[in-house]
Image (cartoon, rainbow, N blue to C red):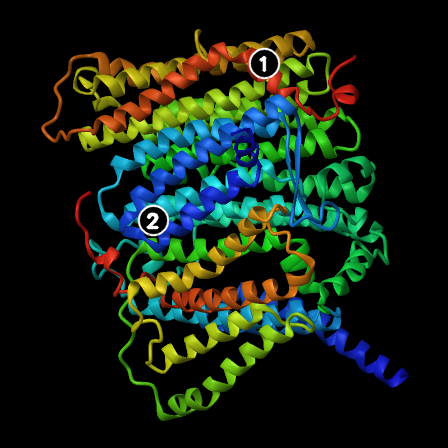
Amino acid sequence: MIALAVAVSCPIWAIVVPLVGAALTMLWPRRATFVGAAATLTTLAVVTALTARIAQTGVQRYAVGGWGAPLGIDLYADGLSAILLAITAAVAAGVSLYGLRYFRAVSVLAYFWTLWLFVWAALNALFLSGDIFNLYVTLELVGLSAVALVALAGGGAALTGALRYLLVSLVGSASYLLGVALLYGQYAVLDIASLGAQVQPDTVTWVAMAAMFAGLMLKTALFPLHFWLPAAHGAAPAPVSAVLSGLVVKASFYILVRLWLQLFPIAVPAPGQLLGALGAAAILWGSIQALRQERLKMLLAYSTVAQIGYLFLVFPLADTVAAQTAWLGVLMFIASHALAKSALFLCAGNILRYYGHDRVHKLGGAARGEPVTFFALGLAGVSLIGLPPSGGFIAKWLLIEAAMASGQWWWVLVMVTGAFLAATYVFRVLGDGLISGTVSARRQVVAPGMAGAALLLALGATVLGFLAVPMDELRQIGWPLVAVRGGQP
Amino acid sequence: MDALGLVNAAFDLVVIVLLPAVALGAVMSADLFKAIILFITLGLLLALTWVRLAAPDVALAEAAIGSGLMGALLLSARERLARTRPGRDRRTSHYPRWMTHPPPRRSHRAVSPWAASGLVLIAVAGLTAAVVTLPHEAAGLAPEVARQTPQRDLANQVTFVLLDARGYDTLLEIGVLLLAVAAVWSLGEAPEPPQNAAGPMLQGFVGTVGPIMVLVAGYLLWAGTDAPGGAFQAGVMLGALGVLLSLAGRHPLARLPGWALRLAVVSGPMLFLAVGVTMIGLGRHFLEYPQAHAKALILLIEATAMISIGVILVSLYAGGRPLSDESGTRKGRL
């Protein structure tokens, strides 16, 4: 039994299992739902085993092909990887449950499972990669499968959004790859840990870092590079929007964090302040745009633009006394936004199914017509605004605390303003739903599984508020460079 | 020796001048057909450049994929654009209008040309500064690769890196190809191929060259362990044959039943995964081949990958899911 648990917790399974699932759904499209559900459950099991293993025995390093760095590729799983894997698994459970009932055409259903399992495999591979070139490959896999998922909606808007997303995604990856090539030219090694031990603050390294950061910022849709996001996230099928906003933009952010923590040769304040300023601009601009949207899905997409801004506020705080608080805050933020935003997009899918439209000012009576969905909408909205008790509350609290402790009070102003704006656009949706308006005739039944999936994710975002301590314990496992960067003034 | 050096220098000079000129021409050309032809030319020039940089494997791949197959895909896309007349079937067509229209001459500019030029200048300046300071004769990991390759009974270091040392990357790259097919199939059914019968020239050409191409693919695969070549190049050769057959009106995949086609597409990545997992079963790491069987396993993986790659490329060229695929035509409810 113990031997089995150890065997199953090997990091490679988190990649192989969904990949095999994707290939099997392609081979056997008529049984795609069965294969997809089986692959989902198995992947959840192996990711749970892996996370538990990391929590118990610490950092895992796995030499794929048996070669080991520098010749081969190492998988590397520390606490940071474990947190991202766990978040992905949680959102994946909700999305898979939703996907069971959402798609109606058999052909679309089969391709949804293939592409979605591909995204999941690629995300797991990305969070487990210890090699900057392998990260590029996983980044490409994530990007391409996400693009294909957007196009699954069919129709002009989705195809246009998907094609623009494809071009942006390729430019972003190419820019990242340029940086990888420069780093390999300079240091002759691709393994992140070995690179981290060698990096020097010279021209090549800074140019490489600039290229990689620019590409990843484009992929994360940081203001003003967010132009592609609303079209893609707004036009995609609901479960796909949930994956894109909840997980995919976080993947490129995760690489940014890795690069920042492990490859930046010296601590310099200027890039951090610049990233923070862009993040602040994203919060304000995205929130205002969200307020102006007619359609719920577009509102949520612009809200994602705003919420991505919060993630980047960690960089100006990362080299101060409050670094540890700020990092925990941002990880909490990633988790709560992943759960809350995916829940909200699933709710939007239900509303779209129920009403036949998702125009925000015509949702009157939604609370009575779709009570479970509406409850999930409210719950996830609470976390999005950052009201207690929720993961979003703890995340914003920690970030504000870090900003105060490091004397950078201006970020607090931005965050508070962002929370007010978020409250305004969330209540704009909720308010109309609570008013007992007339429900239009075109009503369709939403499957219980679809409402339940949204509710589960929203509950997850709420429960997260009580999980800050275990998350911090997990985070500290193998936390990079604690002694050098994180702490003393 | 001196004369040869002079010839090489002159050759390099021609390539250096032509590369940016052809690239610019491809980007600036208002005529789509001209742009595609220039793009194909660019691919060939790049292949020559790789030869001059002593990277024959990359040159082969660039010529086959970057120039040959990309060219075929672009030309067929252009033909499809021309066939979809504007305004017709707007309700059922799920392509956005600008895709079915001929591209407008003056499109809306989202970014000012000055800002774009500024960004490009900054990027060029940064890259120049970086490249100038890069170490000149950096060996990278090459000595280590050269030391390990012969122990695997391989002579081609590229194959060693791609299939053995970094086989995991290659597995994921083949996954990208599989993903591409899934994406194209998810978009809709393949368009009815044009009915105009191919001329006797093309028919005769395919008949003559087809068997030779199969032979070359087999050679590239077999020789790939010791000389430039391998699954990707061999697969592209098969793919090119498939494209030629399609052009000649003999659609090679149309006769396959849906399950056989899907099996052919999936078998490459599946076998790769299966070999990897088998190694775990034998108490080794994922994809850690035993010393004695490394070469055989690599050949097995490459042979299956070759077939998958070939079929995948022809499927991509067909531009949609096959009409014979039952899962596509049955639009039932769950």
Q: Are marks 2 and 1 on the same chain?
A: yes
Q: Is residue A285 above or below residue B150?
A: above
Quarter of the image where one finds residue A196:
top right
Where does the C terminus of chain B fall, quadrant-wise?
Answer: top left
- For disc 1, the chain is A
Three-letter amino acid code of the residue under disc 1: Leu
- For disc 2, the chain is A
Q: How many marks?
A: 2
The percent position of residue B92, horizontal first and vertical second, equals 21, 55
Report which residue position mark 1 lands on: A399
Where does the N terminus of chain B fall, quadrant-wise?
Answer: bottom right
The percent position of residue B84, horizontal first and vertical second, equals 28, 65
Quarter of the image where one finds residue B320:
bottom left
Report the residue at 42% width, 58% height from top: B266
Tell me if residue A21 can be seen: yes
Report the residue at 42% width, 43% height from top: A117
Dot 1: element = helix
